[in-house]
Image (cartoon, rainbow, N blue to C red):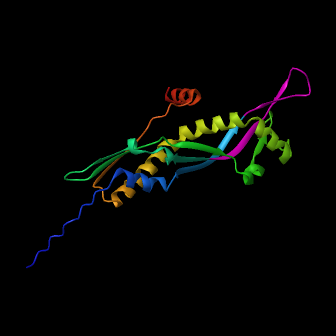
Amino acid sequence: MLILLQSRKKTTVRTESVIHRIERIAELSTARMTTLLIFEPEKESIVPGTSQRYIFIVPFQVRGYLDLKSIDSNSIEIYEGESRRIKLVLPPPELEVTIPQSKIPDIRVINQSGVLVKVFGNRDMLKTFQSYSKEIEQQALISAHEMGIEETSRESARNFFHGLLLGMGFDEVVVLFKELERPQSLRESTNTAIR
């Protein structure tokens, strides 16, 4: 009986070649979530000193992605030896909130009495949303954070780079993320959710 031992030829992978492979990606979309946001702005009434409250039900999308342009040689550590290991430190996922233009007709408005109304035309509704865009975006980010899109985005990126780097010949891959200081409103929402 003839036993053939297959030896694996080890090639040296330099940090620059890994960076070159990652630079070609530039931006990696890692998660997408579509959901509804309930937003309650107040609109001044015709009667002085009073206001009308409305509830807007807004479909929105949040996309988690990694901007890979910041990866450099300080982000990668390669260990050669019995087994070839690599440690990659990625930037934290970024979140992008959008309200697709095709979904603007799907926005629902409920007045103080709980009646579904169409108070505005599409042009007025768009103007109203533009005036509240920062508040809507902030609430959407808080909602997405509570639903776990950041963790989903991290896990997706970890899986992608694990496969990519194993395919480049590494035996062990460790993917970490830089921590980014969260805006105060997200920290407060997380603290509130934990209580």
Q: Find out whether residue 45 is within the magenta segment.
A: yes
* Nearer-the-camera pick, 49 or 128: 128
Which residue extends farthest top? 49
Decide: is 165 above or below 191. Answer: below
Task: Report whether residue 116 is seen.
Answer: no
Q: Nearer the viewer, residue 73 or 154?
A: 73
Q: Quadrant of the N terminus?
A: bottom left
Assess whether residue 162 is covered by the magenta stretch.
no
Q: Residue at x 33, y 53 (%)?
A: 14
Residue 134 vs 175, above or below: the answer is above
Specify the segment rendered in magenta. Answer: 40-61
Residue 118 versus residue 25 in the image, above or below: above
Furthest-left residue in view? 1
Expressed as whole percent of the image width and height from the top left, the position of residue 54 reads 78, 35
- Measuring from the top left, give residue 119's x and y in whole percent: 85, 41
| Residue 24 spot, x, y in % from top left | 49, 56
Q: Quadrant of residue 37?
A: top right
Does any portion of residue 62 appear in the rendered image? yes
Residue at far bottom of view: 1
Task: Tell me where residue 144 appears, x and y as whole percent.
Answer: 57, 41
